[in-house]
Image (cartoon, rainbow, N blue to C red):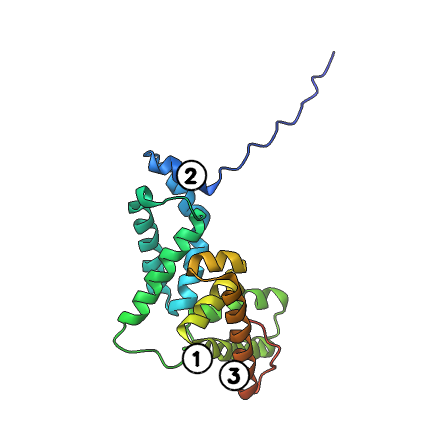
Amino acid sequence: MRHRIATARPAMPKTTDRELVDAAREGDGDAFGVFVRRHQKRIYRLAVHMLRDAAEAEDVTQDAFVRAYGALDRFDGRSEPFTWLYRIAVNLSLNAIRSRKTQRKATTPDDPRIEGQMVERRASHADPSRLSSDREMAAALCDAIDELSETLRTTLVLVTIDGLSHQEAADVLGCPEGTVAWRVHEARRKLRVALDKRGYSPKAEVG
């Protein structure tokens, strides 16, 4: 009896963001749903680091996709769809910050950015005293980030926290790549100084 030898099927190529947006522009709602699921977590992470508030970040994330869907016909393709989406989310976050009646002065214990930093630390060690110290340092780092100018903070979040390249961040922010590089360097310098004043290692990284 002969056995049929199974042959592996070639992997289906992943649909690109441009293909998803083009399909959505033609009325394919499922394609836009895939686009949303692909970028939802990253847009939320961006918003939560800018707004320091989980509920506001959720609202901005939802609004960003609603705005993007409504503007599909105006997407000209000169930039990548995800940088176009990031630009929408950044502008919505900045508008939300500017519309606040009062500015938050200090990091609170329930700041969602702290919990985000603690997830990786819990995975690497479970020493309660160490975790407590790490939480204090995370709060100090968040305070130091909040002391940055709006421009430096936004650029730092895009590059250091969200992982965009300097060119991608430049496309989102509408500035030269060299300007992004300088902003990131200056933001990190200011963070080292701020953390040093708080008694923490100036080598602490944003994460």
Q: Secondary structure at mark 2?
A: helix
Q: In the figure, 6 relative to 52: above or below?
A: above
Q: In 3D space, how far apart are the residues under numbered discs 1 and 2 (Cα atoms)?
A: 39 Å
> Could you say where residue 132 lies in the image, as x and y percent from the top left?
55, 78
The circle drawn on residue 67 is none
**Do tag 1 and tag 2 residues touch (Cβ < 8 Å)?**
no
* Nearer to the camera, 113 or 81: 81
Residue 55, visible in the rendered structure: no
**Do tag 3 and tag 1 residues touch (Cβ < 8 Å)?**
yes
The circle drawn on residue 194 is 3
- At a point 35% along the width and 34% down the height, the residue shown is 28
Q: Which residue is mark 2?
A: 20
Going by the numbered disc 3, the residue's amino acid type is Ala
> Could you say where residue 147 lies in the image, as x and y percent from the top left?
43, 79
Q: In 3D space, how far apart are the residues under numbered discs 3 and 1 (Cα atoms)?
A: 9 Å
Going by the numbered disc 2, the residue's amino acid type is Leu
> Could you say where residue 131 lies in the image, as x and y percent from the top left?
57, 75
The circle drawn on residue 147 is 1
| Sequence-wise first label, 3 or 2 | 2
